């Protein structure tokens, strides 16, 4: 997400009574969260459980390079996304466990609106869980930088909320 987009989002959120801002501990998310937090006069609470998917040995490679260098593993990862552990990295299931636990812990600390700045992998894992672990849904969702989801967490229930007419005001923000 660009710096100007983050400032615009912060201005849009000023009327939302944001109680807290949480962020991945990775630099892209921290910077976005810091820009928003500065405008809203709130501190940023860093949580490493919100960091991006660990691609291990695949880190920094394009999908074409991974497919060329690890064809069997790539196919297994694509067809068994939840359970396949990337060499030297993690599985989507592992990402889901840590990110989901972070969201639950955050929701139990606050009773109002909380902004969580995370990454596309975290968002995909959350969507995967909420949409019944449907692989086609997970890979079919188009997530651009700056994509956002709004979640309503009440007790043990999590609901993906529609945001008619609003594309920039949500509680989980991808960088």
Image (cartoon, grey):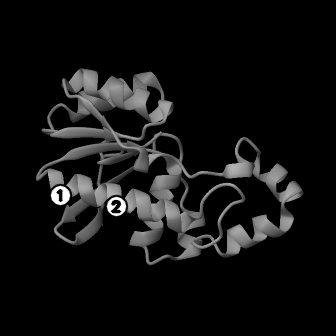
Which one is earlier in the sequence, the residue at label 2 or at label 1?
Answer: 2
* Rendering coords of residue 158 (x, y %): 27, 68
Q: Name the foreground residue: 6 vs 96.
A: 96
Element on which disc 2 rests: helix
At x 48% / y 27%, what residue is drawn? Answer: 2
Q: CA distance from mark 2 to mark 1?
A: 11 Å
Callout 1: few (<14), some (14-19), or many (20+) C-alpha neighbours within 10 Å? Answer: few
Find the residue positioned furthest to the right: 68
Q: Which residue is mark 2?
A: 101
* Rendering coords of residue 4 (x, y %): 41, 22
Q: Against 56, is 158 above or below?
A: below
* Rendering coords of residue 54 (x, y %): 60, 51
Q: Is 98 situated left or right of 154 in this image?
A: right
Q: Indicate the quadrant where residue 103 lies.
A: bottom left
Q: Is 99 situated left or right of 20 in this image?
A: right
Q: Which residue is mark 1?
A: 108
At x 14% / y 50%, what residue is drawn? Answer: 110
Q: Name the foreground residue: 22 vs 120.
A: 22
Say whether marks 2 and 1 touch (CB < 8 Å): no
At x 42% / y 26%, what residue is drawn? Answer: 31
Q: Indicate the quadrant where residue 82 lies.
A: bottom right
């Amino acid at each position: 997400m660009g710096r100007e987009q983050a400032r615009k989002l912060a201005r849009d959120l000023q009327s939302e009574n944001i109680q807290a801002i949480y962020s991945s501990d990775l630099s892209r998310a921290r910077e976005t969260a810091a820009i928003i937090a500065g405008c809203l006069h709130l501190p940023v609470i860093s949580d490493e459980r919100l960091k991006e998917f660990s691609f291990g040995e695949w880190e920094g490679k394009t999908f074409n390079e991974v497919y060329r260098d690890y064809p069997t593993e790539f196919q297994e990862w694509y067809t068994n996304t939840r359970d396949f552990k990337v060499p030297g990295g993690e599985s989507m299931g592992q990402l889901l466990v840590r990110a989901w636990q972070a969201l639950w812990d955050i929701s139990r600390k606050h009773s109002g609106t909380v902004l969580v700045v995370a990454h596309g992998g975290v968002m995909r894992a959350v969507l995967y869980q909420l949409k019944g672990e449907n692989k086609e849904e997970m890979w079919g969702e188009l997530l651009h930088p700056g994509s956002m989801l709004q979640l309503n967490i009440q007790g043990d229930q999590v609901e993906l909320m529609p945001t008619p007419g609003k594309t920039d005001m949500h509680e989980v923000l991808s960088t």
